Image (cartoon, helix red, strand yellow):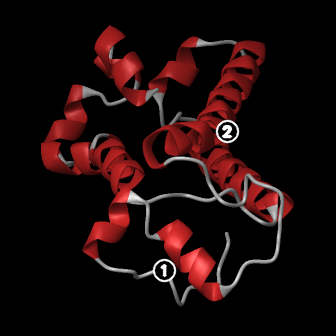
Protein backbone atom coordinates (compact mmCIF):
# COMPACT_ATOMS: atom_id res chain seq x y z
CA UNK A 1 0.00 0.00 0.00
CA UNK A 2 2.82 2.37 0.91
CA UNK A 3 4.60 2.12 -2.45
CA UNK A 4 1.35 2.44 -4.43
CA UNK A 5 0.51 5.73 -2.74
CA UNK A 6 4.19 6.79 -2.87
CA UNK A 7 4.15 6.32 -6.68
CA UNK A 8 1.03 8.50 -6.99
CA UNK A 9 2.07 11.29 -4.59
CA UNK A 10 5.07 10.84 -2.34
CA UNK A 11 4.05 13.72 -0.08
CA UNK A 12 0.99 11.76 1.09
CA UNK A 13 2.99 8.96 2.76
CA UNK A 14 6.63 10.05 3.03
CA UNK A 15 7.13 13.79 2.50
CA UNK A 16 10.45 14.91 1.06
CA UNK A 17 11.25 16.83 4.27
CA UNK A 18 11.62 13.44 6.01
CA UNK A 19 14.69 12.75 3.86
CA UNK A 20 16.74 15.06 6.10
CA UNK A 21 15.81 13.02 9.18
CA UNK A 22 15.13 9.48 7.94
CA UNK A 23 17.78 7.90 5.71
CA UNK A 24 16.60 6.35 2.41
CA UNK A 25 17.78 2.90 3.48
CA UNK A 26 15.57 2.96 6.59
CA UNK A 27 12.50 3.60 4.43
CA UNK A 28 13.44 0.59 2.30
CA UNK A 29 14.10 -1.56 5.37
CA UNK A 30 10.58 -0.86 6.57
CA UNK A 31 8.67 -0.93 3.28
CA UNK A 32 10.70 -2.93 0.74
CA UNK A 33 12.94 -5.46 2.46
CA UNK A 34 10.01 -7.13 4.18
CA UNK A 35 8.68 -8.14 0.75
CA UNK A 36 12.03 -9.69 -0.16
CA UNK A 37 12.23 -11.54 3.16
CA UNK A 38 8.69 -12.89 2.77
CA UNK A 39 9.40 -14.04 -0.81
CA UNK A 40 12.60 -15.83 0.26
CA UNK A 41 10.86 -17.42 3.24
CA UNK A 42 8.02 -18.63 1.01
CA UNK A 43 10.47 -20.22 -1.44
CA UNK A 44 12.73 -21.81 1.18
CA UNK A 45 10.34 -22.79 3.96
CA UNK A 46 7.13 -24.81 3.77
CA UNK A 47 4.36 -23.28 5.88
CA UNK A 48 1.71 -25.51 7.35
CA UNK A 49 -1.77 -24.31 8.10
CA UNK A 50 -2.04 -23.40 11.78
CA UNK A 51 -3.51 -26.02 14.08
CA UNK A 52 -5.18 -23.21 16.02
CA UNK A 53 -6.45 -20.88 13.32
CA UNK A 54 -8.50 -18.92 15.85
CA UNK A 55 -5.38 -18.05 17.88
CA UNK A 56 -3.44 -17.01 14.76
CA UNK A 57 -6.33 -14.78 13.64
CA UNK A 58 -6.48 -13.23 17.11
CA UNK A 59 -2.75 -12.39 16.79
CA UNK A 60 -3.28 -11.02 13.28
CA UNK A 61 -6.19 -8.75 14.24
CA UNK A 62 -4.49 -7.64 17.48
CA UNK A 63 -1.46 -6.44 15.50
CA UNK A 64 -3.65 -4.79 12.84
CA UNK A 65 -5.67 -2.92 15.49
CA UNK A 66 -2.55 -2.01 17.48
CA UNK A 67 -0.98 -0.42 14.40
CA UNK A 68 -4.18 1.53 13.72
CA UNK A 69 -4.25 2.66 17.34
CA UNK A 70 -0.70 4.00 16.93
CA UNK A 71 -1.44 6.23 13.97
CA UNK A 72 -4.87 7.33 15.23
CA UNK A 73 -3.29 8.21 18.61
CA UNK A 74 -0.62 10.23 16.85
CA UNK A 75 -3.39 12.12 15.04
CA UNK A 76 -5.48 12.78 18.13
CA UNK A 77 -2.47 13.93 20.18
CA UNK A 78 -0.67 16.02 17.55
CA UNK A 79 -3.54 16.82 15.13
CA UNK A 80 -1.23 15.55 12.34
CA UNK A 81 -1.61 12.30 10.45
CA UNK A 82 1.33 9.92 10.36
CA UNK A 83 0.41 9.31 6.71
CA UNK A 84 -0.72 12.50 5.00
CA UNK A 85 -2.99 10.48 2.70
CA UNK A 86 -5.48 10.38 5.60
CA UNK A 87 -5.40 14.18 5.77
CA UNK A 88 -6.82 14.39 2.23
CA UNK A 89 -9.88 12.31 3.19
CA UNK A 90 -13.07 12.85 5.12
CA UNK A 91 -13.65 10.69 8.20
CA UNK A 92 -15.88 8.22 6.39
CA UNK A 93 -13.23 7.89 3.64
CA UNK A 94 -10.56 7.26 6.29
CA UNK A 95 -12.75 4.53 7.78
CA UNK A 96 -13.37 2.93 4.37
CA UNK A 97 -9.67 3.13 3.52
CA UNK A 98 -8.81 1.54 6.88
CA UNK A 99 -11.29 -1.27 6.21
CA UNK A 100 -9.76 -1.74 2.75
CA UNK A 101 -6.24 -1.97 4.25
CA UNK A 102 -7.42 -4.55 6.80
CA UNK A 103 -9.32 -6.47 4.12
CA UNK A 104 -6.43 -6.64 1.67
CA UNK A 105 -4.06 -7.63 4.47
CA UNK A 106 -6.40 -10.47 5.41
CA UNK A 107 -6.61 -11.57 1.75
CA UNK A 108 -2.80 -11.74 1.63
CA UNK A 109 -2.81 -13.75 4.88
CA UNK A 110 -5.25 -16.28 3.41
CA UNK A 111 -3.39 -16.41 0.06
CA UNK A 112 -0.15 -17.54 1.68
CA UNK A 113 -1.38 -21.10 2.19
CA UNK A 114 -2.31 -21.96 -1.43
CA UNK A 115 0.82 -20.17 -2.70
CA UNK A 116 2.96 -22.17 -0.29
CA UNK A 117 1.29 -25.43 -1.42
CA UNK A 118 2.01 -24.52 -5.06
CA UNK A 119 5.70 -24.18 -4.25
CA UNK A 120 6.16 -26.98 -1.70
CA UNK A 121 3.40 -29.43 -2.57
CA UNK A 122 0.48 -30.56 -0.50
CA UNK A 123 0.81 -30.12 3.24
CA UNK A 124 0.34 -33.33 5.22
CA UNK A 125 -2.14 -31.47 7.44
CA UNK A 126 -4.35 -30.99 4.37
CA UNK A 127 -4.95 -34.72 4.24
CA UNK A 128 -7.19 -36.37 6.78
CA UNK A 129 -5.42 -36.87 10.05
CA UNK A 130 -4.25 -40.46 10.29
CA UNK A 131 -1.81 -42.19 12.56
CA UNK A 132 1.73 -42.01 11.20
CA UNK A 133 4.92 -43.30 12.62
CA UNK A 134 7.70 -40.74 13.20
CA UNK A 135 9.53 -42.23 10.19
CA UNK A 136 6.50 -41.53 7.93
CA UNK A 137 6.35 -37.91 9.08
CA UNK A 138 10.08 -37.47 8.53
CA UNK A 139 9.88 -38.99 5.03
CA UNK A 140 6.91 -36.79 4.08
CA UNK A 141 8.58 -33.67 5.42
CA UNK A 142 11.94 -34.35 3.79
CA UNK A 143 10.32 -34.10 0.35
CA UNK A 144 10.15 -30.32 0.62
CA UNK A 145 12.80 -28.26 -1.14
CA UNK A 146 13.95 -26.60 2.06
CA UNK A 147 14.99 -29.92 3.53
CA UNK A 148 17.93 -30.18 1.14
CA UNK A 149 19.72 -28.09 3.74
CA UNK A 150 19.05 -30.34 6.73
CA UNK A 151 16.13 -31.63 8.72
CA UNK A 152 15.70 -28.73 11.12
CA UNK A 153 11.98 -29.27 11.75
CA UNK A 154 12.08 -32.90 12.85
CA UNK A 155 12.26 -31.85 16.51
CA UNK A 156 9.81 -28.95 16.25
CA UNK A 157 6.67 -29.15 18.37
CA UNK A 158 5.00 -25.93 17.25
CA UNK A 159 2.31 -26.08 14.54
CA UNK A 160 1.57 -22.33 14.55
Badge 1 local density, few (<14 within 10 Å), some, or many (20+)?
few
Q: CA distance from mark 2 to mark 1?
A: 23 Å
- The residue carrying mark 1 is 153
Q: Position of residue 71 (x, y in %)?
A: 59, 44
- The residue carrying mark 2 is 110
- Residue 23 makes an appearance in the image: no
Element under disc 1: loop
* Residue 130 sits in quarter: bottom right
Image quadrant for the C terminus? bottom right
* Residue 31 sits in quarter: top left
Q: Nearer the viewer, mark 2 or mark 1?
A: 1
Q: Position of residue 43 (x, y in %)?
A: 35, 49
Which residue is at the front of the view, 145 or 160?
A: 145
Side (left or right) of 89 relative to 31: right
Side (left or right) of 109 relative to 50: left
Image point 55% across, 44% down: which residue? 117
Element under disc 2: helix
Amino acid sequence: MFWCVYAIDRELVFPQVYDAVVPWWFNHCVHTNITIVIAIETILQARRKPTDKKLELIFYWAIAFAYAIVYYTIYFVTKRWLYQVFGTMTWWQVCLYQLFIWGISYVFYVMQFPINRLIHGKDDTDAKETEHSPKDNEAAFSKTWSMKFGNTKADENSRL
